[in-house]
Amino acid sequence: MSNYYERIKELVIDTESTIKVKDYIKNKTILNNNYKIGNLIVESQGGIEKAKYGNKLIKEYAKKLTNDLGKGYSWRNLYNMRSYYIMFTSNEILQTLSAKLDWSYYVELLKLKDIYAVKYYIETTYNKGNGVRELRERIKSNEYERLPDDTKEKLKNKQELELKETITDPIIIPNPNKNNIILEKELQKLIMENISLFLRRLGTNYMFVGNEYSIKIGTRTYKIDLLLYNKDYNSYVVIELKVGEFKKEYISQIETYMNYVDTNIKNLSDNKTIGIILCQRNNKLLVEYCSRPDVIVREYILE
């Protein structure tokens, strides 16, 4: 134990000495040292299989580090380092991603069992520039689990996704006052009260264009419930809100709005508009027979 402990102690001291250096160097050093500490812990416990279940030695190391350095290195922190080493040394798909985020992010990700979910959250968090709090919120809402199965399969195979494939099902809408929503206007008001969170839950780089967005066709004026723009895919997104079950007549309504946006609003450099019908219940059999590729139906859940 003593030899492993002294090597762990040296790495802890090295980590502490990097706190004041530039962020990139600091983060890289902390991650490297935590990985090495995790490796030493696993070796001292007799390998990965044995290390997965042994915490007694970790508690001894934590106690000695606290006594020697006064830094309060808890057994939980050392446990996380061991888990970090096991996760990133055992899975090839994660090895190139191990330095993209700060240690505090990995502490959240270590709680996950699905390696593909970990990969998804690392990549999307890095691309979105999310903070730890936002990552924790996305994990808590089971964002990865709510992606369509076809989307998850494409992610595993490193295939490029279309915008519609990045949208979760169901979509979770915050309802802090637990209001009983019975009208589309009430649902729209609920979304607008926290539009930034709604956009984040849709995906990356959504911009709000307008709600009850007025368009004129002939002599009649219509209102699009929500009009958004996605900068990653250069595409407008029309959202229609429906309280209740999906009905086939919703398709023609949203198609009209999408065609208007394509003809009168989008630029030549923009891709075609997509439509999202957001409803309380999705009649999947009906959708199968009447939906077109650029219109998707998603259920919503109030939380």
Image (spheres, rainbow, N blue to C red):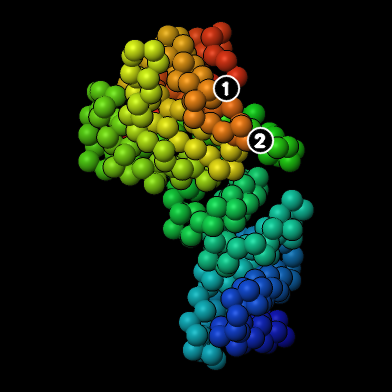
Q: Residues within 10 Å of mark 2 (few under 14, many from 20)?
A: few
Say which quarter of the image contains residue 41.
bottom right
Residue where numbered disc 2 is placed: 161
Name the foreground residue: 52 vs 158.
Answer: 158
Q: Judging from the image, what secondary structure is the residue with disc 1 in?
A: loop
Percent x, y of residue 202: 48, 39
In the rendered structure, the answer to whether residue 62 lies left or right of residue 116 reads left
Say which quarter of the image contains residue 184.
top left
Residue where numbered disc 1 is placed: 294
Whether 230 is drawn above or below 149: the answer is: below
Say which quarter of the image contains residue 141.
top left
In the rendered structure, the answer to whether residue 99 lies left or right of residue 173 reads right
Residue 69 seen by the camera = yes
Where is the C terminus found, in terms of image quarters?
top left
Toward the bottom, the furthest residue is 68
The amino acid on which the numbered mark 1 sits, given as a three-letter code, is Asp
Whether 238 is drawn above or below 138: the answer is: above
Name the foreground residue: 293 vs 272.
Answer: 272
The amino acid on which the numbered mark 2 sits, given as a three-letter code, is Leu
Percent x, y of residue 17: 60, 88
